[in-house]
Image (spheres, rainbow, N blue to C red):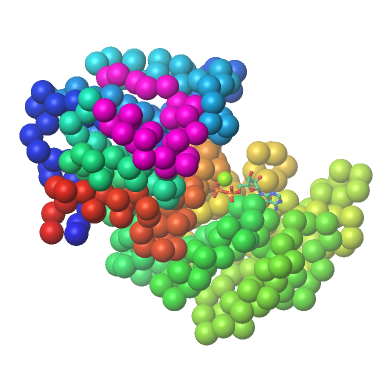
Amino acid sequence: MALPLLEDLPNPSGKKVLLRADFNVPITNGHIDDDLRITAAMPTIKWLEDHGAQVTVCSHLGRPKGQPDQKYSMEPVRQRLAALAPEVEFMENLRFDPGEEANDPDFVDRLVEGFDLYVNDAFGASHRAHASIVGPPARLPSAAGRLLAKEVDVLNGLVHRPMHPFVAILGGAKVSSKMGVIEALIDKVDQLAIGGAMCFTFMLAQGYSVGDSLVEPDWVEACKGFLDGPDKHKLLIPNDVVAIGPDEEVQVFIGDIPDGWKGLDIGPSTTLAFIAPLEHAGTILWNGPMGMFEDARFQEGTVMVAEAVADSHGFTVVGGGDSAAAVAKFGLDLRIDHVSTGGGASLELLEKGDLPGLAALREASNAPA
Ligand code: ADP
Ligand code: MG
């Protein structure tokens, strides 16, 4: 079965549509910091309204523990959405009910009650087998919204038909969360650069000392596997890093990092080595900041990579919540071809080629053969 799209729904005119969106947006003191996920759902809402449907949106927000918690109220999101789509109705946080995360069938029944159709546009939540993601397609004619369909197209396209040279740049906090993606991409890419905190586990595997930098010792062997593997020539590992010392002094080290020092950004020579292949790349995938860019002292590597990605004439994709926040912070988001709205979901799709939410949609009664 193929993924059912909006066009595969029975005529939505006059019908009540339950739209699962991912409006899990960053909120500080009741203010939405970044509304990418809300604006990204507008094409689907507009399509449904243009076709005469009455739309009710549902989403989760944060991690309330299965009970109502004012701290995780969707009110700021409801207000933002009301300004963009005044006709749309909006439910309270799905995770205020324990049935959502437990995928409780009774909760699914209550959720779909009174609705005729279901649309999933919540790409960022589709790697979770939660009630609102996998439940409704077994009960109502269902479809993938425009955003979900586009995310799937773009990310599957990277794996199956990239324009070469295909360069991936991975960074971020944990090597463990990105090992699966390295594994999935290493034979597809022409070069794979590794920055962020995850580079230190690779440097450890190369035999360097990394001082007090973040490492995941359990993953050293896996890193060695890639460093000695058939695609080892594709890997770019930092040879210099910016580190902070015991008295808050900041210094660049080539190779070994002394005890008491913690690496927080890639160094200038590494940055040049990482951005060089981007100039002529046909496809670029960037996931994970190169350093602790939230601190201006350690943002240089991330800024330079972000600018090189934005300048590229190739097809550019940025995935990961913090990387997306970084390109937005530097004002480069409009110069990237696709900024994914999903962090975990984009990694899992690249890794496994499928998500529980997509599998559920393909099983819907109206899915095309
Ligand atoms: P994304 O959300 O883009 O997938 P991650 O969540 O994996 O990225 O990682 C982002 C975080 O990694 C950022 O908050 C950044 O500060 C942190 N980080 C990057 N490099 C380092 C480093 N060298 N040491 C500590 N933290 C780092
Ligand atoms: Mg993150």
Q: Is residue 279 above or below residue 122?
A: below
Q: Is residue 264 above or below residue 98?
A: below
For ligand 2, give the image quadrant: top right
Taking the image as drawn, is residue 247 in sight? yes
Q: How would you classify the magenta stretch by its main secondary structure?
A: helix
In which quadrant is the C terminus drawn? bottom left
| 311 or 204: nearer the viewer | 204
Number of disc labels:
0
Task: Tell me which residue sits at (34%, 15%) in the image.
Answer: 83
**Farthest residue, direction right:** 247
Judged left or right of residue 68, residue 1 is: left
Q: Which residues are magenta?
A: 88-113
Judged left or right of residue 362, residue 178 is: right
**Farthest residue, direction front:** 106
Task: Tell me which residue sits at (57%, 32%) in the image.
Answer: 65
The image shows residue 145 at horizontal and vertical percentages of: 25, 40
Judged left or right of residue 365, residue 188 is: right
Taking the image as drawn, is residue 46 in sight? no
| 292 or 132: nearer the viewer | 132
Task: Tell me which residue sits at (84%, 61%) in the image.
Answer: 211
Is residue 95 rendered magenta in the image? yes
Q: Is residue 67 above or below residue 238?
A: above
Is residue 346 rendered magenta in the image? no
